[in-house]
Image: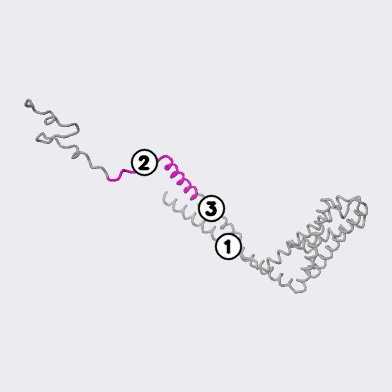
Amino acid sequence: MKPGQNNAETTPLLGTIEDGDGRAKGTAESRPPRPLHPPPPPPSIDESSQSQGATTKSSKSKRRKKRQKSVQAKIKEQLQKRIEGPQRSICHVTFNLIRIVAVVANFMMLAQQLLPLVLLKEESTLLQNAVRAYMIIFCVSFIVLELRIPLLSRIAMPNSNWILKGFMYSFIGLIGMEQDLALKVEDIAAGTSSLLNPDYGTMIATLFLTLTTWIMIGIGAVYTLMGLLCMQSWYENMEKKHRERVREWKKKKKKERDDAKKKRDMEQQEERAGWFADEV
């Protein structure tokens, strides 16, 4: 370096690069150009946690929907299994509902006759107990008849004419109403109860007795009306055809099960024969 020469001309600046001739290149040429738009900031912790929470919620909802679909499919399959087979018509179902209501009414009347025999045994007279015994016999007979138990229904009441049965139901309901009125009169005469201020037990018992007697009278009127309209033969014909269809359907299902079992046995025998052949 010659004396008097400036150091700035020979010494390259910090951050510069010399080329082959020893000249320093500017730092602007070596640095990459700055982007026009700054890069997006990294997601914060709250945003990442919110995205993870949304993902877990969506996965949970998907699993819940999947479970609901599987449960609905199982319920549908069970319903199809129950519904499978010959079905009753609407009229047939209506007649059966009347029978069920009659069975419930007879059970209520039976309870109405049994409770006084147990709770009011000392206060009841011989005539009252005899009437209750006859009422119990009639109620049990009607229950057996309505449940259609083959052997017991023949023993209990062979002639199940709907007109006669309707009169008997109405008659039993009227007797129950008379018994309820007689008990009220006896309690009022004895001073144990009052019409103006009855207790809750008396009110509930009166409501139960009144409801039972009116149901019996209503069922009797319905049976009498249906008997007069010759609906008994129609119902018996529907019941007979339904039993025949059920019998045929059971035979068909039994045959299908037997055929499927034979097919499985044959497939198992073929598999065993092939296995023995491979072993040999």
Q: Residues within 10 Å of mark 1 (few under 14, many from 20)?
A: few
Q: Which mark is residue 42?
A: 2
**33 vs 159, nearest the viewer:** 33
**Picture disc at residue 68:** 3
Q: From the image, state whether disc 1 or disc 2 is nearer to you.
A: 2
Q: Is residue 169 left or right of residue 83?
A: right
Rounded to the nearest whole Å, what is the CA distance between mark 1 and mark 2?
Answer: 72 Å
Task: Tell me which amino acid carries mark 1.
Answer: Lys
- Please tell me in which quadrant of the rendered image residue 51 appears: top left
Q: Quadrant of residue 125?
A: bottom right
Which of the two discs, 1 and 2, labels the residue nearer the N terminus?
Answer: 2
Mark 3 and mark 2 in contact (Cβ < 8 Å)? Answer: no
Instruction: Please name the residue that numbered disc 1 is placed on.
Output: 255
Query: Which quadrant does the N terminus fall into?
Result: top left
Q: Dot 2: few (<14), some (14–19), or many (≥20) neighbours within 10 Å?
A: few
| Amino acid identity at mark 2 | Pro
